[in-house]
Image: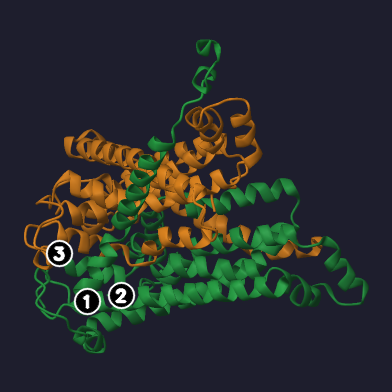
Amino acid sequence: MNSEFKVLARPYKVWLSVLVFFPIIAMIFISISNLNSSVPFSDIAISFRHFELLLESSTLIAFRNSLLYASLTTLISFVLGYFVAYEIKKSKFKNKFILLTIVILPMWSNLILRTESLSNIMSENNILKSLIGFNIFGNISGTGIAVLFGLVFTYMPFMILSVYTALEKIDFSLEEAALDLGLTPLHKFWKVIFPLSLKGVVTGSIMVFLPTLAGFAIPKILSKGRIVFIGNIIENKFIYTNYNHGALLAIVILIFILGSIFLLTKFDKEGETLL
Amino acid sequence: MEKNIASLKDYGYHDFSKFNKISNIIKKLLVVLIILGLYLSIIVIAIQSINDSQVLSEFTGFSLKWYGNILNEEELMQAIKNTFLVSSIATVLATILGTFFAIGLYALSRKSRVIWMLLNNVPILNADIVTGFSLMLMFRLLMVVFPNIFGLFTLVMAHLFFTIPYVILSVMPKLKETDPNLMDAAMDLGVKPYKALIKVVIPAIKAGIFSGMLLALTMSIDDFAISYFNTGAGYDNLSIWIYAVIGRRNLTPSVYAFSTLLTIFTLIGLLIYQFLQKQKKGKKV
């Protein structure tokens, strides 16, 4: 490409630098200073007293909830999602595009409304019960299982897509070779296919883990506010305009994200399974 | 004598055909169940939308009245208008800017391109809540100079921030596929570089631009968390409005009707796309 076009990248470099770094710097500064709307400009000082928040039991419980539910969601999505991706790969149905579209289509519908409708049918009297006569969920409204169900079936398509992308790239002749060399189908899967698809599993896991860890709408709606994630605390700090605390917690989430991206770059140097 | 002849089993062959048949049926059933799980909420939304009663917990009969009622719901209509206004501005701008930015990034040396593409991934990989919260803080600081920026402006800026990277990510591979001689040929024929860009390069990457645009629209129209933190002055998009309503009162069934309509349109769009793809392929053969 003509090097003259380099100038076209210049505005984007400025835009990215400003919008990636400046908000993060602002966030760090606000979390370690007493800056808020009631402090006059001349009294701004560095203070670490907001860090006490990190040791409060409600914060610790929220972190535990976020991590626990994010891990469980990732694990379940991995087992179910891998299975579906593998079945799509194996299926004799020629048009894989349609199969993948079926998997993604629900994601095009409004997330909040979908979660709300799930929450509705998890309560004791609901529209499905009045239609088919019995409760498919029992009465799990407001419980951890309700939250887990919502999270898994919201984010699993990410897992299916990235695992499928990785599976699709595996050369079929490798499978033939494995069978020719006398591996049973089960061995072939564990020794050849699974290791080669690991990249997709890592990408998929991160794409499920991160939004679950940092989410706040799904747990709030499905647990009726009983199970508090770290995102819910940030949301509350935002509502009550306690930006110092909100920024501090957002930074902690950011650290988790950076860790995951670091992990991702180790497994997937080209970033090819990302899209 | 018979005993000396080794059977297939002695060579390690097991006849799994019966077992395979059963496990295949179980597998198919499981896949169907999982897909059903993915669609459960959509199915419930569709049922709510054709329910005669305004009470969300009981089905009293079939009715399409909530579809006609969409236009009468003032708050809902306002939220829908806001959503489409923000998304269309953000999508159009992100598509145009993202395409030119991608061309610019592609013209960079390999080393600096890798670095900028890594930064380009930040808005995509970063959690919505962190992006939303940190952008909100930045806009708050800007409020000292521009007191009324929260609303349409901040929403569009925030949406541009996370949609441009998607456009760049889908245009970049197409740029890599284009023949580098294409540009040279055009310029040898006396076309000026920027004219060649518009006449030669853009048509060559239009598939990437189109898929980038669709991605940007999808991300923008469905966004909740980032918009939630960066809206202001009552400028609610659909997600924020629903989120605010469900805590306080029942949703009008018209919301479900609107969502179902949107799903149906998406489905029709996909089928048309599929049909066109097939025709294209047919022509090539």
Q: What separation in Å lies between label 3 and label 2 (alpha carbons)?
A: 17 Å
In the depicted structure, whether residue A220 falls above or below residue A55:
below
Residue B260 is marked as 2
Q: What separation in Å lies between label 2 and label 1 (alpha carbons)?
A: 7 Å
Image coordinates of residue B163 in percent, x first then y, are 50, 64
Residue at 70%, 75% in the rendered image: B283
Alpha-carbon neighbours of circle 3 within 10 Å: few (<14), some, or many (≥20)?
A: many
Residue at 63%, 44% in the rendered image: A270
Q: Can I make out residue A224 in this image?
A: yes
Alpha-carbon neighbours of circle 2 within 10 Å: few (<14), some, or many (≥20)?
A: many
Q: Colour of chain B?
A: green
| Residue identifier under label 3 | A128
Q: Secondary structure at mark 3?
A: helix
Image coordinates of residue A88 in percent, x first then y, are 47, 51
| Residue identifier under label 1 | B49
Observer-nearest residue: B108 or A113?
Answer: A113
Q: Residue B181 is drawn in which quadrant?
A: bottom right
Q: Of the residues shown, which amino acid type is indicated by label 3?
A: Leu
Residue at 24%, 76% in the rendered image: B255
Q: Residue A6 is drawn in which quadrant?
A: bottom right
Image coordinates of residue B179 in percent, x first then y, are 81, 62
In the depicted structure, whether residue B220 falls above or below residue B25:
below
Q: Nearer the viewer, mark 1 or mark 3?
A: 3
Q: Which chain does the residue under circle 1 lie in?
A: B
Q: Which chain does the residue under circle 3 lie in?
A: A
Residue sticking out furthest to the left = A125
Q: Do marks 1 and 3 share a chain?
A: no
Name the colour scheme.
by chain
Q: Colour of chain A?
A: orange
Q: Secondary structure at mark 2?
A: helix
Q: Secondary structure at mark 1?
A: helix
